[in-house]
Amino acid sequence: MDFIKKRVFFFGLLGFVIAINLYIFSFKSGIWWDEGVYIGISKYIWSFGNAGYFEVIRPPVLPIIIGAFWFLGFNPLVAGKILVLLFFIGMLFLTYEIGRKLWDRFTGFYSALLLASTPFIYSYSTKILSGIPAAFFALLGIYLYVSNKKIKPKTLFFCGAFLGLSFLTRFPQGIAFGTLMLFVFLSNIKNMKIALKNCVALFSGFSLIVAPYIIYNFYAYGNALLPFFAASRIIDATAWFHKSGVFFYAIELFYHNPFFIFLVFGIAYLLYQKSIQKIHILIGFMFFAYFSYFSFFLEAKELRFSLIFLPYVALIASLGMNRLLKAMSVLIYRTDAIKKLKASNANNVFTVLFIAASFMTASFGFITLNSSHLRWLEAPQTQDPYNEFLLFVENHSTNESILTSNPTIAAYTDSRVSYLRGWVAADEIYTREKDMSSTLIIDTCALDCAPDDFICHESKDKFITKTKKENTELFSTTANITGRLCVYSVYEINKA
């Protein structure tokens, strides 16, 4: 009971956050590409390749967790959404606890509040994507480290294990492990024996989780690092679609939550405060490593990529906010009129910020969720062409493999799904696998061609024309999506 009493404002915020997510769940929500892929991989793993779809570039942890529920008979879409919401709650709680442990309960609460009052985060807290679960596991590892006054090798082992889980949930989370490893080494550099001992303990925990995956890759593909290189190539290939410049995150994060301006004051405090403890610098290290990588080294940029470093942004911004308020209170209380106030400045500011930020969450959040460019949240439609297409796929049972341009359908069928992997490669894959497949499913808008990629556009037209002639059409419909004509077709493959 004392645990809840000390965190009463946080749990009030948590109730508000859960209410927003439940509101979003009440709407009809289409499945995103990555969601369908993760569900497909989960089925593939737990059926030993007899169902679903597999992509080597995807980390395995999230599909393994979701697949366990599918294996037990639960709907993987529902189970996955509930799991991500629980991870989101855990992410908020750990952000609060890290801020409270490192500084005070005000900084911890402001940090959780900044996350909860950032509207775009609700686009992902209700989606089966890896960013929030990966952030949770990394924060859990960091929390173990900062919550122990005397760091023991056993603690570092578990820190490494959780960071390993984070890495195998989203590969860029290797940044968290590398940063903590460097910090542990530098913190004990005066005693090289302790430094090496602690680094070995951290690495051992990380390796316990990651090594089996590396070994599997070596025996399965002949290259232990294949998934990492393949994922990097995919990102480079699609950078044309996402590229937005090095200031993308600096601009977008401030645009979505103006309170992130206090990040400047937090960074200044970490840099210039002479009496700051070494453990406090760790959060600054984390922020700098993440922000540098995603802003300067990774061309492809999306707001969802920021989910894994957003808690550190919130922590430093909250630190800046809290320290600025304290500095202002010292100046204000020097005046005779203010001295007569009985309530403390900190508590007054705390209450005002709580109400203001909560109002901002409600207003900005609902505006964002209902804006026209976010099609993922919309009122149910009885005659939506894409939904009719998915319903047909769901009811079209087959024991043989399905060839498709849209792997999202793996969420709607327990058949084995093979992906055409781009219009240029589509004909080769189709020719190789059509005798082992019974159905061809084409979504013409699922695969994008760069505007100036004429080879891709030509390959797309030729492939669609060829497959339409060679196979029996079972279903076809069209829809106009954001100015593009999308054709959804299902064919029975005619064997030679």
Image (cartoon, rainbow, N blue to C red):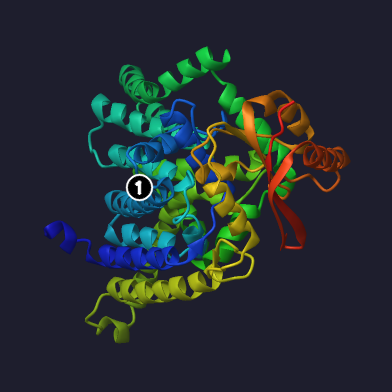
- Which residue is label 1 attached to? 275
Location of the N terminus by quadrant is: bottom left
Horizontal placement of 46 versus 393: left or right?
Answer: left
Q: To which quarter of the image does residue 385 belong?
A: bottom right
Q: Position of residue 443 (x, y in %)?
A: 69, 48
Q: To which quarter of the image does residue 147 belong?
A: top left
Image position of 41 with respect to 382: above or below: above
Marker count (numbered)? 1
In terms of secondary structure, where does tag 1 sit? loop
Location of the C terminus by quadrant is: top right
Question: What residue appears at the point 31 percent right and 83 percent down from the top-left corner?
Answer: 338
Q: Position of residue 65 (x, y in %)?
A: 38, 38
Q: To which quarter of the image does residue 361 belong?
A: bottom left
Q: Residue furthest left?
A: 1
Q: Position of residue 333 (x, y in %)?
A: 32, 77
Q: Is residue 299 at least partly visible in the picture?
A: no
Give 420 or 111, whichever is nearer the viewer. Answer: 420
